[in-house]
Amino acid sequence: MTRILETPAFQRVPSIALLPFVLITFGITWSITGLYIVFPERAAAWLGQISGTHPAFFVATWGPAIAACVVVPSFAGWTGFKAYLSRIRLWRCSIGWAAFLIVGLPLVFMAGSIVRGGPLFAPLPPAGIGSVLAVMMIMLFLGPIEELGWRGVAQPLLQRHMAPLWAGVIIGVTWGIWHLPAFFLAGTLQSEWGFLPFLLGNIVLAVLVTPLFNDSRGSILLPLLFHWQLINPFWPDARPWDTWILVALAAITVWLKRATMLTGAAAVTEVVPRRADGAPP
């Protein structure tokens, strides 16, 4: 009697998928922002003046997420894509990480603001707290959505070939360079900042979120919330002290987590999670 082996309805996303992911990510974001940089008047006439609520700005910001939504089903099929999206439902983490997300990150900004002589919270605009809440919700659907790509695809693929620390550093550098056009685009926050401090901040943040990502078994939700806290309009402007505090926290975290950050033990390496029987969760 011939034994029939059942093949899973999806395939593993291979490491080579990192190449189209990066090309699509940069292609989407840099083409839109580049149009506004090189041909500002023509771009404004065609698409309207760019702003934080402009649809083109959303699409440019969603470059990594769009790339993930193209690459994952291309390699893993729609069943695999659904399994990949199930990682958004992974919310369990240690009490320490939960406290860091809810309390620790706000304290970083508050402490940095106090050092520079600023307030504990960002000043309320004339429109009141309602407008801040509206901006906070808009922010949820901007930068945090990037995590579908950076942590959803790039992190596990890189961790197949190197320790999580170095995967975080590479993502941080890539993440910073991906933002580069924003420094030449009028009206963006980055146009008022220096690129090198921003790049350092991106590397530090990518390293800091790496153990959270691995400890939560590849959660996309928790890095998304981490990203959201970084751009929460309630927190005051703490530059440059917030970066230096985060550098210290990242160094401490890497040391405490050195057994996994430097060796890759317990690192998440799959874009599409599998159960022991090879089926999607």
Image: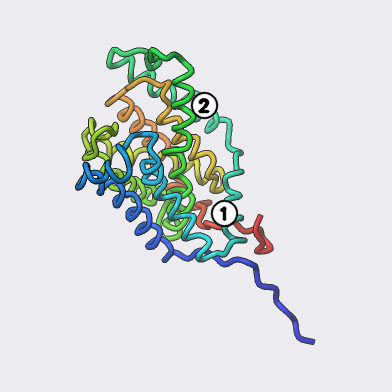
Does 173 appear above or below 256? below
Q: Residue at x 38, y 47 (%)?
A: 168
Residue visible at 50% across and 44% down? 213
Residue labelled with disc 1 = 84
Of badges 1 and 2, the one in the foreground is 1
Left or right, 260 with reference to 46 = right
Q: Name the foreground residue: 279 vs 34.
A: 34
Q: Residue 209: where, in percent of width, then height?
A: 44, 40
From the image, which quarter does the C terminus lie in? bottom right
Return the x and y of residue 226 as percentages of the image width and height.
47, 35
The residue where tag 2 is placed is 102
Disc 1 and disc 2: Cα gap in Å? 26 Å
**Camera sees residue 268:** yes
- Of 98 and 135, nearer the camera is 135
Q: Which quadrant of the view contains residue 254? A: top left
Closer to the camera in the image, 226 or 59: 59
Mark 1: secondary structure: helix
